[in-house]
Image (cartoon, rainbow, N blue to C red):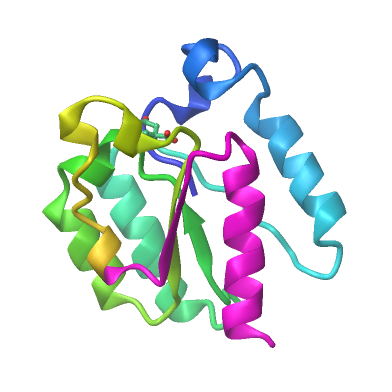
């Protein structure tokens, strides 16, 4: 799952987030994890992200969620509560190393209710999050 502004991945601030778009990232993930069905959801709206998380209550096939909540990571108590509410484990993902950037990016509202955090590996952060989830949940 991706949050706000990540629909612009590949075009947005390429010096920070790279020039690869999410379509290409997803293609790579599906090649790397052929035995896993990878669904993608992106929204710029906090409520839509919350409702997508809630929907996993009725989707026992969802074994985990790699979630780049974008700027909502740093602000959203509501997303934190939604992550805490659902049974599926969530991994917090960031393309950039948020700890080397502005002070306000160093704090995460959601990290404490996530299974783990991956940040700073470019778009490979998504793949590392899926690997971590699979290892934690399936193996
Ligand atoms: C981001 C980091 C956030 O601070 C920022 O607001 C984003 C992207 C990342 O992937 O590095 O939108 O989550």
Q: Position of residue 130 (x, y in %)?
A: 63, 62
Foreground residue, 41 or 77? 77
**Outermost residue to the bottom:** 139
Is residue 19 shown left or right of residue 94? right
What residue span does the magenta drawing correspond to? 113-139
Quick one: 115 or 60, which is closer to the camera? 115
> Quarter containing ligand 1?
top left
Q: Residue at x 28, y 34 (%)?
A: 71
> Left or right: 17 with respect to 45?
right
Tell me residue 35's x, y (percent): 84, 70
User: Residue at horizontal 35%, vertical 67%?
Assistant: 114
At 74% from the left edge and 64% from the top edge, which residue is drawn? 37
Q: How many marks?
A: 0
Q: Position of residue 23 (x, y in %)?
A: 71, 32
Which quarter of the figure is the C terminus placed in?
bottom right
Q: Nearer the viewer, residue 67 or 139?
A: 139
In the picture shown, does residue 38 fall above or below 89? above
């Amino acid at each position: 799952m991706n949050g706000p502004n990540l629909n612009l991945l590949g075009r947005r601030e390429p010096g920070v987030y790279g020039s690869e778009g999410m379509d290409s990232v997803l293609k790579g993930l599906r090649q790397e994890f052929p035995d896993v069905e990878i669904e993608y959801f992106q929204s710029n709206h906090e409520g839509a992200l919350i409702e997508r998380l809630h929907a996993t209550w009725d989707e026992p096939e969802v074994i985990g969620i790699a979630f780049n909540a974008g700027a909502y990571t740093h602000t959203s108590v509501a997303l934190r509560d939604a992550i805490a509410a659902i049974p599926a484990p969530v991994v917090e993902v960031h393309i950039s190393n948020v700890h080397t950037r502005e002070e306000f990016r160093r704090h995460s509202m959601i990290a404490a209710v996530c299974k783990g955090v991956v940040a700073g590996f470019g778009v490979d952060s998504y793949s590392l999050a899926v690997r971590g989830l699979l290892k934690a949940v399936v193996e």
